Image: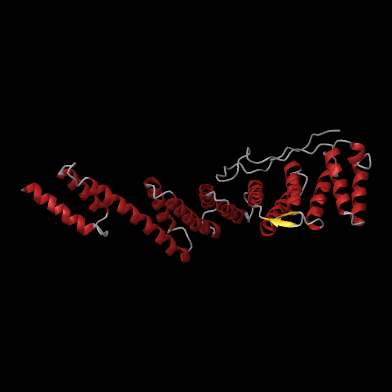
Amino acid sequence: MSNLGEAPGTRYATDAYPGFDTEKDVVSPERKEPRWFQFLTGPKYDNATDQFAYGRQLEAEESWSKAVRAYDAIVRNWPTSAEAPEAQRRMAEILLEKEDDADEAFAAYRYLVDFYSFRCDYNATVDKMYEIAGRMRVEGKTIIYFRFRNTVEVRRAFEACVLRAPGAAWAPKALLMIGELREEEGRDTEAVSVYENLRNLYYGTAEAKEGVAREAQVRMRLLRDHGYNRERCVDTAAFLRLATTLVATDRIPEVEAALAETERWLEEEAYRAACFYDSRMRTRRSAANAYAKFLKDYPNGPHAEEVRARLEALKGTELK
């Protein structure tokens, strides 16, 4: 019994995707192997053709769970047979449409594109994966008839879709959703990385513009949470200036408001730094230089007149 076949990942994206889970974070799908105790759990027939016919018979009888097991046995025991890819596809279809198990159906379709990428309708399959990921997002995960939020699993499902079809029409929407899910996880730094990648890879799309607006919100949240760290504040201000040229027109006011808040803090920080030099421990010249630099950077700010007056006073004192 051969275990040879097409290698997984033959059509994966080669681009890096910052903000996604790494391979070490995600358990990669392994090739199916024959189950233990074959006399109990193995195929009913000794060849893939008859076993496939048996699976179709079980479908006709609406014995959905048995049909899934029958098709699964083909993939496990005859992975390189002509019937294996179609058996895997039918198993995924039953799990989705008859068993109403979106999580297991997604895993089954993912296995199909990973191990039979050239023996299935690749584009249709990844489209189906994206559709199921959306369904998982809406429905949540069912455990003993109860629905639970499954943010991490859903995000990884969308990530799997993007990695397998970065050129799909829905890829920008998937990235936008991944960023949103990262936010829900409280992983704002990763969310920023996802939104940045969306902006770079799909520049100018409606999703990229929305991603810029969301990135602005997340960056401001990070800024406030970290007590207006100066380096982060300077970086955020630079991004927000760029963002005003990238977001949709109706989002410009909120980005401009965020930029104004950031620049106000930078000005206050610069004012405090200038005042630090105006003390008995410092020379008048150093204080005058600090105030002059402040006025150069913030000539029209709320402290400008006060600083001008103090600067003139220092100059007058120096002349005396």
- Total marks drawn? 0
- Please identify the quarter of the rendering in which residue 119 is found: top right
Position of residue 297 in the picture relative to residue 3 (left or right): left
Give the x, y percent position of residue 263: 35, 55
Residue 78 seen anywhere in this rendered image of the structure: no
Q: Is residue 32 above or below residue 159?
A: above
Rendered image quadrant of residue 96: bottom right
* Residue in the image at 44% along x and 63% along y: 254
**Residue lying at 76% horizontally and 50% vertically, measured from the top left:** 104
**Front-lying residue, 49 or 272:** 272
Towards the viewer: 252 or 95: 95
Image coords of residue 244 (percent x, y) = 42, 59
Question: Residue extending furthest bottom?
Answer: 250
Q: Is residue 240 left or right of residue 168?
A: left
Coloured how?
secondary structure
Q: Position of residue 256 (x, y in %)?
A: 40, 61
Quarter of the figure that contains the N terminus: top right
Residue at x 66%, y 49% (from the top left corner): 153
Which residue corresponds to the image point at 7% horizontal and 48% vertical from the top-left?
319
Residue 150 x/y as whole percent = 66, 52
Residue 68 makes an appearance in the image: yes
